[in-house]
Amino acid sequence: MTAPLLEIKDLSVSFGQGAKEVKAVRNASFTIEKGETVALVGESGSGKSVSALSILQLLPYPVASHPSGSIAFQGEELMGADQTRLREIRGDRIAMIFQEPLTSLNPLHSIYRQISEVLFLHKHMSKTEARARVIELLELVGLGGAIDRLDALPHEFSGGQQQRVMIAMALANDPDLLIADEPTTALDVTIQAQVLKLLGELQDKLGMSILLITHDLGIVKGISDRVCVMNDGEIVEKGVTAEVFADPQHEYTRHLLETEPGGAPEPADSNAISLMACDNLKVWFPIKRGVLKRTVDYVKAVDGITLDVKQGHTLGVVGESGSGKSTLARALLRLERSDGTIQFKHHALQGMKSNDIRPLRRNMQIVFQDPFGSLSPRLSIAQIIEEGLVVHDLGGNYRARRKLIAEALIEVGLEPDMMDRYPHEFSGGQRQRICIARAIVLKPDFVVLDEPTSALDVSVQAQIVDLLRELQKKHNIAYLFISHDLKVVRAMSHDILVMRHGKIVEHGPAGQVLDAPREPYTRALMAAAFELKADETGVVQE
């Protein structure tokens, strides 16, 4: 028998030593054959990413160590290999797509420079050859429209577009093994389907193997040949994907398969007052070219949006990456320049000076998509939550503020004695709870939730959805809920607004939009999200 492409035996990973040793991975063993897709599944902290980073020897040594184990790639031992050899393999024979694209991309370098770097390093291409290959790769991952923006920086793209840039970079040298660490977490459902289809086509074309790390079991079922389930650093179950899904043997595997956000929000008062509204809202970004940087066109991120969010209601905003969802939210909060009218609690926000808006900001808060990126690593949890209280002169003295912070932490399901710890000491789900506590400690009337569950495990997603619904019921908060996950949107929203290219495609009660969509684009979203098939007439069928 031929040797597998990758063979991992008895892999253990520890951080620290002695009494402070954390055993992140314990005696993990699995193989990946040529042309095969193996999924590594488990919740945050189970050891998935640590196992993957060990393959390329990317862990921070000597903080991390391998008490045991062997990692053989095409029969060559990588454990303890010298750095020169590892650099030859990394990005060429083995490539990796990281989970957080904006953290992984260099903020100071253009996307062209970052994608072409691996081509210059491993293929020694000329500038002309590299440019042609970069354009080919961008078209391959569905970013053909970005070819005119090769000199743009990563922050000028949406989260989904950033992830596709990362995928293009990983595929540049046609690797034998692609390690994909949550490659579709930040992507909307239609782009998820496109990316997974693309990876499948490339796998067939190149004979490439894939190690897929994910918490999304729907993706695992659709793309992987075999699956390894990890829990607390150990592989608790592995086998052919269809067999594991049909008859899971381990209790933890059954728990993963059974847990997902569900239910619906509490019925809202139809006579509630209007809290946040806008009319003909526009956010246009100029496209400037030439030596004099003259405006030649505009990116119409938000183009004539009219909406109304009532007190105690949740308006779900869905649409593909780059449709303008997050830009709309920032514009409503006056964090982005815009045209049109914005009304918050009968205050006309458009045209108000920053100092005049500041007192109103206590009542309109935002929870961002990436909890780790939105929490200062230099501040304790108490300092992070206290900041809003200090700015708005709330809570009285230091001791009184500490009491309010403790109450906010209890409300979001955390212990008050956690307040003097720092963000890196918490899991992803706990960090998102901290972000929610930072918002609700001010007792706001309106909260923007920008993809608050996209980076979280399915079971943690369900917990956060339950928490947000409970807080809404208790405090009568209005939510603007932005998400690409329509299962979560169904569980949260009273009304849904569908966006595409900065415009409203469809708007109505959640049940109507999700169960009987009128527009072909909405039907396509539903088909991708709920695993339905649309026939050629656009009618969605089971």
Image (spheres, rainbow, N blue to C red):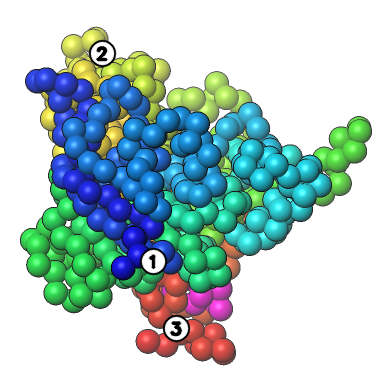
* Residue linked to disc 2: 396
Labels 3, 2: front one: 3
Labels 2, 1: front one: 1
Pick out the residue farthest to the right: 291
Magenta stretch holds residue 525: yes
Q: Which mark is residue 36?
A: 1
* Residue linked to disc 3: 533
* Marks 1 and 3, how far apart at CA: 26 Å
Residue found 29% across the figure and 58% down from its top: 31
Task: State the image coordinates of residue 7 (x, y, percent, origin top left).
Answer: 30, 53
From this view, report whether residue 390 is shown above or below residue 253. Answer: above
| Quadrant of the image containing the C terminus | bottom left
Residue found 34% across the figure and 33% down from its top: 80
Q: Quadrant of residue 138?
A: bottom right
In depth, the one of 488 and 88 nearer the eye is 88
**Majority secondary structure of magenta residues:** helix
Q: Amino acid at mark 2?
A: Gly
- Magenta residues span 519-526
Tag count: 3
Q: Is residue 538 left or right of residue 272?
A: right
Q: Amino acid at mark 1?
A: Glu
* Marks 3 and 2, how far apart at CA: 58 Å
Magenta stretch holds residue 503: no
Q: Is residue 463 left or right of residue 194?
A: left
In what element is the residue under mark 3?
strand
Q: Are marks 1 and 3 in contact (CB under 8 Å)?
A: no
Give the mark nearest the N terminus, 3 or 2.
Answer: 2
Task: State the image coordinates of residue 52 (x, y, percent, origin top left).
Answer: 34, 45
